Every structure is written in C-alpha cells, then in structure tokens.
Amino acid sequence: MRGKRLLKELSRRRVLKGMLEGGAVAVALPLLDCFLNDNGTAFASGEPIPLRFGTWFWGLGMAEKVFLPKTIGPNYELPPEIAALAPVRDFVNVYTHFNAFRDAAPNLCHYTGWVILRTGVAPTTGGDLPDETIDVTIARKVGRTTRFKSLTASATGDVRNSFSYENANSINAAEWSPVNFYVKLFGPGYQDPNASTFRPDPRVMVRKSALTGVLDQTRQLERTVGADDRVRLDQYFSDIRGLEQQFDEQLTKPKPIAICHRVDAPKDDPPQGEDTELVALRHRMMTDLMVMAVACDQTRVVNMGYSAGFAATIKAGYEKPHHTCTHEEGVDPQLGYQPTASWFTRRAMESWSSFVQAFAKVKEGNGTLLDNCLLYANSDTASARIHSLEGIPIFTAGRAGGRIKSGLHIDGGGTAGTRIGFTIMKVFGADATEWGTNSNKTSQEVSEMLG
C-alpha cells in the first residue's frame, strides 16, 4: 500500500515514474520558467515561496556609548561597535531598550537574559530551561515537511554551545565541525532536487515503516492513561507524526529549486581554539553550508551561535579572553568604555554582518533568500562590563516575505523584549495569543516592525 501511495504522489508531481532494483524512480522535468509565477514571488502552482527563520547569538552584549544608534526609525547611524553592519543596514532592524525581567528569579549571569528572550520565562536555576525556545515553536509550524526540522551550529568548536532547546532534557546539540556538517547536509542522504533521476533512500523507507507501526499503537495507549498524560503523549506523538511527514517528503521526488546547488566539501576542519580569526573562519564555513541547506529546502529553521554567553574568544597578543576582559579591563577615561572588550564586540558584529550578507547574496524569485527569511539575533547581557539585563541588544534581519519592515532602529522604551519574539511567532502563524510569564508576559506586538 505504501508503494501505491508513493507512486500516486509522484504522479501528482508530474514526473516520469518507474522501478529500479525494488525502489521507485522518477525522472523530473527540466528546470523551466513555468515553475515560478510571473513576478517570481510564488511557484506557478500558486504555492508561495516558503518563509524561513533563523537565530544568531553572541555573548557579552555591548558598550552602550559606541553601540546604540541615537536616531530612531530608518537611516539610523552606525556607531563604531556596529559599523560592520554598513553593507546590510537596510536589511537589519536594531532594537534597543527592550528589557528581560527576572522578577523574583535570580540573575544567572550569561543565562537569564537569553533564556527569557528565547522562551519568555525567567529561569530559576542554571539548568532550568522553562519552555521550548522560539525556534522550536516556529519549526513546528514551518519545518514539518523538510528533511531537517531545524539545524543548529556553533562557531566555537564546542557542541555544548547551543541556544535551541525542546525542553531542559532535550537540547538541540550544535554541530561544530564543517566537515561533519557537510556530510550531514550533502552526504549520502542528500537528494538533489535538480537531479534528473530520483531513487528513494531504502533506509528512510525502513524508518517510515517503523514509525507507522509505532503510531498504530498510540491510539490504544492514549485510551489507558489519564488526561494530563494524554496531553503529554499527544505532544510527543505529534512530534513523531511530524517526523513521519519528513520521511514522506524524503520518499517523494523534490520539486526543482533553481537556487539550489551542492557546495564544495570542506577539506579540513579549522584548528581547534577560540582565536577570533579561527572563530570567524569556522563561522563562515558553517554559514555557507547552512545557507545552501536553506536554499535547497532541506530546512526552514536554522540556529547559529557565534560564541558562548561567557564568550571565550581570544585576541592575538592579549592574554585574557573576552569574558575575563569585561570584568578586569578598566574604562578608558577618554573613550568612556573598555576598548579591548569593545574590540571583541566589533569582531562579533562582523560575523553577524557576514551571516546576513550570506542570505542576501542568494537570488530567489524577484528578490533574495533573505527577503523570504527572518533572522533573529540577541545576546545574553546588555552592558558587557556589568552584565545587566536592561536593554539587551536585539536585531532582526530580512523581511519575511514582506511581513516585516527592515532598516529601522526601534526603541522599546523599557518594555518587555518578549514583545519581539511574540511578534515573530505571530508572523510565522503561531497560535499563541500571548507569550511569556509574569513581567515578561505579553500580547502586544511591536507594530513598528510589521510590514
């Protein structure tokens, strides 16, 4: 029966079908202009170009004096710490004076701030992940039919530096090796959407069959447990059904994608270490792979970490890492800030700029891949020197298919930073009418950012 359903699905996708060595084979039509509509904003069938979401993280915030633009709205100026954004300013929104409220919870340095901004809830202990992160919520909406529901990578070389969680017991571990990341994305399991032939991976067929068998047993199990357990089981089995949908897609010839091509495999991983040049190199390599995975519709949700919250990046010739520097370096009386700590922040902003540029370089329809993305970047603290939570810097980049305005400096006036995350989730179709708890709870969108 599964084979019949597969053949029926292939016929709807208008390909030539056949069999080879027990597996279904399809020959696709060549890549034609008719696959897109006249203005390049949707496929000819009327199916829109998909929306994608990404997160980006850097540790240790900023120095307000040289980070915060004074001009509100469009055409904001670029103080020295964010001068690297010059090539992408019109694509990037800067959000200032948005707060993370800990209420009665402790201030867990390098943890509380980013957890609030990504889950809406203040953690009570260092191991507390009180809810799923925003990328997981959005992946449940847009990532169920792609090969990977989401992808997570780190430029630090440390798999533990992830800011994506299903819950406290289920961390989406970060890929740290460009070589391994390439194999995962473009190795034996990759199906080129522009290939002339298609053969389903027999390993996926086995996994799909196994999952189908598991799901057949869930109805009986759900009838034997209480109401609370049924809710938990429903979420669990919903995730399994999502995985089954992903397998269905992998067993179907993918539609041609003009912008998709296999990138060159990296020969070697960069050397271990957190010298800023090595981190920047690792970041560029992982970004290039991640962007093409999005372009090839292998995933629609990505997460990139530039550094850990307690950033350990190193400057050549300087004996202390970034984190130690923020604690021990004095404020220059003439400059009014910590010059070396600021140097580290500027290197982080160079990588953030390069991340945005990588999406902007890929042409899609009548625009770019970035036009159909929304990238969300945040840090763990506001002031690098005192590790404060008031006014943690936040960015978005991209226009989410026209749903978001870009090129703006938006001042939150001390309101909850969760307003930004709530707005983003609504843009991606999340059902929530509010987000967060206590002082971080909000049902108020940031109207200035909406297109």
Image: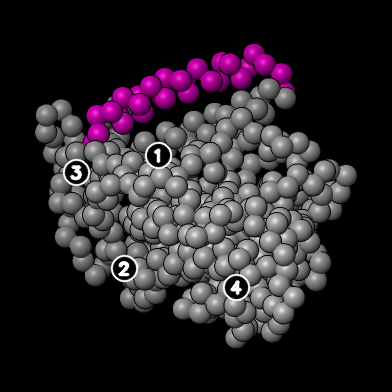
Relative to 327, 77 lies left or right: left
> Which mark is first along the chain, 2 or 1?
2
Which x, y percent locates residue 118?
Answer: 65, 50
Relative to 271, 201 lies left or right: left
- Above or below — where is 374 with respect to 245? below
The residue that label 2 is drawn on is 36
Relative to 323, 245 lies left or right: left
Query: Where are the magenta residues, as a range?
Result: 200-227
The residue that label 1 is drawn on is 246
Q: Residue at x 45, y 47 (%)?
A: 273
User: Please, what secondary structure does the residue beneath circle 1 have?
Assistant: helix
Which x, y percent locates residue 143?
Answer: 47, 47
Point out which mark residue 198 bears. Answer: 3
> Which mark is first along the chain, 3 or 4?
4
Q: Residue at x 36, y 28 (%)?
A: 208
In depth, the one of 348 and 434 nearer the eye is 348
Of badges 3 and 2, the one in the foreground is 3
> Which mark is first along the chain, 2 or 3?
2
> Which mark is first along the chain, 1 or 4?
4
- Above or below — where is 440 with respect to 370? above
Q: Tell me which amino acid carries mark 4.
A: Glu
Picture quadrant of residue 319: bottom right
Crowdedness near tag 2: few (<14), some (14–19) or many (≥20) residues, C-alpha within 10 Å: some
